[in-house]
Amino acid sequence: MFSEEIIQDLISRAIAARQRAYVPYSGFPVGAALLTKSGQIYTGCNIENASYGMTVCAERVAILKAVSEGETEFVLLAVATEIGASPCGACRQVMVEFAPDMPVLIADLAGQTTTLSAAQLLPLAFLPQHLQEAARL
Ligand code: THU
């Protein structure tokens, strides 16, 4: 569905975004790159805080940047870490809100990539439809 060129470009952008990570506490840079239906690409990096719980992950930075620019239709997300770590639960919840069917490319720096949809990453997710169903009762 997506050309190898698009996939590799998105992964390269996610890897590049790691360079802007603000990670004085963990030393674990994460980069993300999000392709929207309109063809725009939004990148994100993790941004930590001395109050540790205020840290925001790279995936959510990319998604929130896109939403704040008026984009809510997402088609492909790449996330890059040195070891190919998979996205945290909070990020998975934000992904399924907008794009359950979106493939998520989980890349390491050695060229390995695992791909799962946002819904596969978060089985039995709590979704907007659940609130709508409850409101109808
Ligand atoms: N982190 C991400 O950016 N994305 C994830 O999905 C997992 C964790 C960040 C948060 C923190 O800055 C660092 O990785 C270590 O937890």
Image: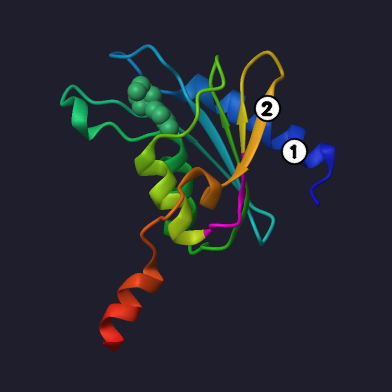
- Examine the rendering and report whether any part of residue 40 can be seen: yes
Residue contact between numbered discs 2 and 1, judged by CB atoms under 8 Å? yes
Q: Residues within 10 Å of mark 1 (few under 14, many from 20)?
A: some
Q: How is the image coloured?
A: rainbow
Give the quadrant of residue 10.
Answer: top right
Residue on which disc 1 sits: 7
Q: Residue 103: where, in percent of width, then height?
A: 64, 47
Q: Residues within 10 Å of mark 2 (few under 14, many from 20)?
A: some
**Label 1: element kind:** helix
Q: Is residue 87 above or below residue 62?
A: above
Residue placed at 66% from the left, 61% from the top?
37
Decide which of tag 2 and tag 1 comes sooner along the chain.
1
Left or right? Give the position of 72 relative to 128: right
Magenta: main secondary structure equals: loop
Mark count: 2
In magenta, the rendered stretch is 99-104
Q: Residue 24: where, in percent of width, then height?
A: 31, 13
Q: Residue 2: where, in percent of width, then height?
A: 79, 48
Q: Check disc 2 and give the amino acid type.
A: Thr
